Image (spheres, rainbow, N blue to C red):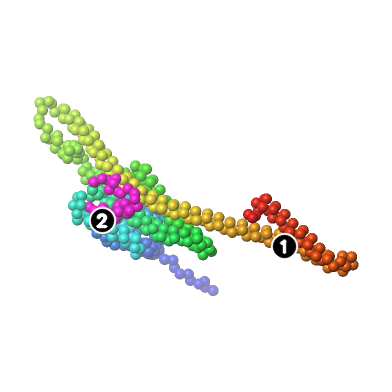
């Protein structure tokens, strides 16, 4: 009896090829559509996979997960070596020194952010210095009665801002606009409903108030997290310095391209400065000392100049964050005031319900006492209804006397119980 023949195992090359095909299939499934907006306001759609995006922006995989709209991550702003990750409500994007990348979506808030960013960058490139109009975010802050960004900056133009600051400002503006719209919509519905509940307490109105409160709590939590995130950035100078991507990029390019060319701090290379020095009768052995002195002067002056520029950009970023921090704080105060108003109305409803409950309890006590008094008449009637001979049956006025005495005893018992309840403050009579 011959044993059944088994299929021959595939060769190692075939297995490797099948594995590579599986890897390509997985990578194909990871392709996502990204919208790219450059510093000139031009946008284009990119079809790249996750690993390409990680290499492009030098980001770990956990940071890209934060931008996925299908995942619920708390609002945050993270600083990386070459990018700033912004996750503020519907604004989820990657900001680099010369472009903004965000997942393509049909959400209206994402489209509004892209359009506003393009409009801001296009107007900035078309207009001259000092003609850049105040963005709508400043108007939003002014409408809220808080300090405007221009009040912080004075007459300084936004044209001198790095690209990442302008993109971050548009993102903060979009988040503030969305949260402000949510707060306004909630206020329009909440206050008339709460006033209606005060005058008419019923099951439907109480249910609507509970639904309103369940909607208010997550919104308040989101605004609180955005506020805490901005405050954390404002309190950390190191993070604000890391967010200066344009400065870091120019410094890196200067390091790579400018190699050993040293500058004196006034725009003249150190070599030219040394050549332009007139000949001195002193021996040439002092030339290295002179070069060392120039190099020391250049390092000091260049360090001070870079420190001043970095400090100025840090101050501009802090002013920007502070303006929107005030705006977010005003929205949070609205939600807090609305929550307190809802709590006050809930306390009023509870007081009204407790009052009605107390009235029902008092009525129940009164009915119970009256039933006890009526039970005395039933007991007397039951005693005289027994069939045994007594002399009282032969008296014509006996029935009147029994009825009068029983009524007097029952009335006295009722008055005594009511006095006891009043004395103990169990009934408000």
Magenta range is 132-156
- 148 part of magenta stretch: yes
What residue do we see at 50% from left, 60% from top? 199
Element under disc 2: helix
Q: Residue furthest top?
A: 282
Residue annotated with mark 1: 371
What residue do we see at 76% from left, 59% from top? 408
Nearest to the observer: residue 232 or residue 52: 232
Residue annotated with mark 2: 120
Element under disc 1: helix
Task: Please identify the quadrant where the N terminus is shown.
Answer: bottom right
Q: Residues within 10 Å of mark 2 (few under 14, many from 20)?
A: many
Q: Tell me: residue 269, above or below residue 329.
A: above
**The quarter of the displayed image where residue 123 is located:** bottom left
What residue do we see at 39% from left, 55% from top? 66
Label 2 or label 1, whichever comes before in sequence order: 2
Q: Residue 283 vs residue 246: left or right?
A: left
Q: Where residue 323 sits: x, y (%)?
A: 33, 48
**The quarter of the displayed image where residue 406 is located:** bottom right
Q: Residue 331 vs residue 123: left or right?
A: right
Q: Is residue 313 visible?
A: yes
What residue do we see at 70% from left, 52% from top? 420
């Amino acid at each position: 009896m011959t044993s059944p023949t088994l299929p021959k195992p595939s060769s190692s090359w075939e297995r490797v090829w099948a594995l590579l095909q599986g890897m390509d299939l997985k990578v194909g499934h990871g392709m996502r559509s990204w919208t790219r907006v450059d510093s000139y306001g031009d946008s284009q759609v990119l079809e790249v996979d996750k690993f390409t995006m990680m290499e492009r922006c030098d980001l770990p995989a956990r940071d890209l997960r934060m931008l996925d709209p299908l995942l619920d991550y708390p609002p945050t702003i993270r600083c990386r070596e070459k990018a700033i990750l912004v996750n503020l409500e519907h604004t989820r994007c990657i900001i680099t020194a010369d472009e903004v990348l965000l997942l393509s979506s049909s959400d209206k808030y994402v489209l509004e952010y892209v359009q506003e960013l393009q409009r801001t960058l296009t107007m900035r490139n078309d207009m001259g210095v000092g003609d850049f109009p105040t963005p709508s975010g400043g108007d939003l802050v002014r409408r809220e009665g808080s300090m405007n960004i221009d009040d912080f900056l004075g007459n300084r133009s936004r044209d001198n801002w790095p690209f990442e600051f302008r993109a971050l400002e548009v993102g903060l503006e979009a988040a503030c606009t969305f949260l402000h719209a949510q707060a306004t919509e909630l206020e329009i519905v909440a206050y008339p409903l709460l006033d209606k509940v005060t005058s008419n307490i019923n099951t439907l109105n109480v249910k609507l108030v509970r639904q309103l409160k369940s909607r208010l709590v997550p919104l308040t939590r989101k605004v609180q997290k955005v506020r805490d995130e901005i405050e954390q950035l404002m309190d950390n100078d190191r993070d604000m310095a890391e967010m200066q991507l344009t400065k870091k990029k120019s410094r890196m390019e200067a390091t790579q391209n400018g190699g050993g060319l040293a500058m004196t701090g006034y725009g003249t290379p150190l070599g030219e400065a040394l050549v332009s020095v007139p000949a001195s009768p002193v021996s040439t052995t002092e030339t290295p000392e002179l070069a060392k002195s120039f190099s020391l002067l250049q390092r000091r002056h260049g360090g001070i100049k870079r420190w001043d520029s970095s400090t100025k950009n840090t101050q501009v970023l802090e002013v920007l964050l502070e303006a929107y921090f005030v705006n977010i704080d005003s929205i949070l105060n609205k939600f807090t005031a609305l929550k307190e108003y809802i709590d006050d109305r809930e306390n009023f409803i509870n007081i009204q319900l407790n009052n009605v409950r107390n009235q029902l309890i008092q009525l129940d006590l009164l009915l119970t006492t009256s039933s006890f008094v009526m039970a005395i008449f039933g007991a007397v009637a039951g005693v005289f209804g027994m069939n045994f001979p007594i002399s009282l049956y032969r008296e014509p006025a006996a029935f009147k006397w029994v009825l009068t005495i029983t009524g007097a005893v029952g009335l006295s018992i009722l008055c005594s119980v009511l006095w006891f309840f009043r004395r103990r403050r169990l009934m408000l009579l």
